[in-house]
Each structure stands twice: as C-alpha cells, then as structure tokens.
Image (tube, helix red, strand yellow):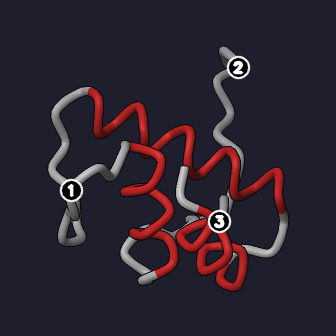
Amino acid sequence: MNIHYLEEAIKVVPDPQVLINMVSRRVRQLTASSRPMVEVEPRMGYADIALAEIAQGKVGIAERTEATDFSTR
C-alpha cells in the first residue's frame, strides 16, 4: 500500500475505522470485476485504487435515514 494514497484519503475520511470499512468494501467490489473510477498507475494494488478513489471523492458514505422494519404484522 502506498502511503501517499493513505495520507490523501485520511484527509477526506479522518475516522480510521470508517476508512478501513470503506477500503475493504471497495476492494471487494474491485476484485469482483468492478471498474476503477480513477486512472490506474502501474503497480497499484486494489487497496491503492480504493484509497485514490476515496481521496478524489469518487467513493463516499451514504448515511442511513431510517431503519427497515422486517417484523411480521
């Protein structure tokens, strides 16, 4: 993992746990054949791509607005 991408992503998402979750989810998507949303440079791994996408604002967090009620009525 390139420290430069990490430093840039931390500026956008300062909470380490949230950043880890975002990178993890995006890496799973990339390994499942999702296309990168940034220009990929040689020797960039999936984590580097995910961090670069976060740093450039291509990947964000969606807040939950309401919990879904699955109870039977």
Identified by mark 1, the residue type is Pro
Secondary structure, mark 2, is: loop
Q: Is residue 13 left or right of residue 48?
A: right
Q: Is residue 28 above or below residue 6?
A: above
Residue 23 circle label: none
Which residue is nearer to you in this view: 60 or 49? Answer: 49
**Image location of residue 49, percent across then percent down:** 37, 57
The crowding category of the residue bearing disc 2, from other C-alpha atoms within 10 Å (few below 14, some 14 to 19, many at least 20), is: few
Residue under pointer 3: 63
Is the C terminus in the top left, top right, bottom left or bottom right quadrant?
Answer: top right
The crowding category of the residue bearing disc 1, from other C-alpha atoms within 10 Å (few below 14, some 14 to 19, many at least 20), is: few
Tell me which corner region of the image, top left, top right, bottom left or bottom right, holds residue 42: bottom left
Residue 71 circle label: 2
Residue 42 circle label: 1
| Mark nearer the N terminus (1 vs 2) | 1
From this viewpoint, which residue is outermost toward the top? 72
Which residue is nearer to you in this view: 31 or 5? Answer: 5
Q: Is residue 59 above or below residue 33?
A: below
